[in-house]
Amino acid sequence: EAGVAQSPRYKIIEKRQSVAFWCNPISGHATLYWYQQILGQGPKLLIQFQNNGVVDDSQLPKDRFSAERLKGVDSTLKIQPAKLEDSAVYLCASSLDPATGYTFGSGTRLTVV
Amino acid sequence: AQSVAQPEDQVNVAEGNPLTVKCTYSVSGNPYLFWYVQYPNRGLQFLLKYITGDNLVKGSYGFEAEFNKSQTSFHLKKPSALVSDSALYFCAVRETNAGKSTFGDGTTLTVKP
């Protein structure tokens, strides 16, 4: 089966600019997650979707971050405006059900200068 | 709230020797436990999981993990380490029926020839 696709792989932007990341999960996986992984730390959940509804966005900085999952398939994560501390790898993952492990994409490495 | 601790930032072992990467967790209910591996410039890959049943679970690449409820631990083990096992390892916990996994900050495993 195809894996979780993410794009772009790398992005460098200046602070206060905006950026968007795209994720296409494994076909049939209803649950989609966006995680932020800062260098030297474990992934931290930003938002969880079940189909096209938000299940958990308690750790999403909503003043600058937004995410959507139209039609319950692809998802986009946007940052506007970006701050230096947003430099991280943004990981998308999907899963079939809570008892299974996640399948992660390769991530998008964001550098804010 | 659920949490994970990986007490060792780095583990060094010689090739052919057994390895252990430690993980302890905290949840209010019954846990689902997972190990993931991350190679340089790659996304996280699922290694193994504990849901219920036998306390010793086997996963990919010859890895296994032992669930110990009284010590709230889920240590990753391998009887004979390979140089190719060198990577970053993450432990994760999810409360039963909860959607999101919480990750530890990772342990860098280095296997020397």
Image: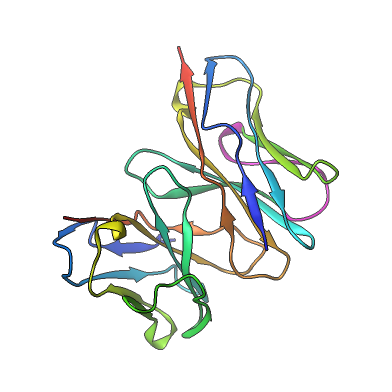
In the rendered structure, the answer to whether residue B58 lies left or right of residue A17 reads: right
In the rendered structure, the answer to whether residue B57 lies left or right of residue A107 reads: right
User: Any magenta on residue B74?
Assistant: no
Percent of width and height locating residue A28: 50, 74
In the rendered view, would you say B104 is above or below B95?
above
* Total count of labels: 0
In the rendered structure, the answer to whether residue A44 lies left or right of residue A110 reads: right
Q: Which residues are magenta?
A: B51-62
Please tell me which residue is depicted at 67% across the width and 70% down the height of the picture.
Answer: B98
Query: To which quarter of the image does residue A4 belong?
Result: bottom left
In the rendered view, would you say A40 is above or below A46?
above
Percent of width and height locating residue A66: 35, 79
Closer-to-camera residue (B52/A11): A11
Q: Looking at the rendering, in which quadrant would you find the N terminus of chain A?
A: bottom left
In the rendered view, would you say A68 is above or below A12?
below
In the rendered view, would you say B87 is above or below A102?
above
Residue extending farthest right: B70
Percent of width and height locating residue A112: 20, 57
User: Any magenta on residue B56?
Assistant: yes
Percent of width and height locating residue A55: 55, 80
Query: To which quarter of the image does residue B29 belong?
Result: bottom right
Please tell me which residue is depicted at 60% across the width and 39% down the height of the picture.
Answer: B6
Please tell me which residue is depicted at 53% across the width and 59% down the height of the picture.
Answer: A102
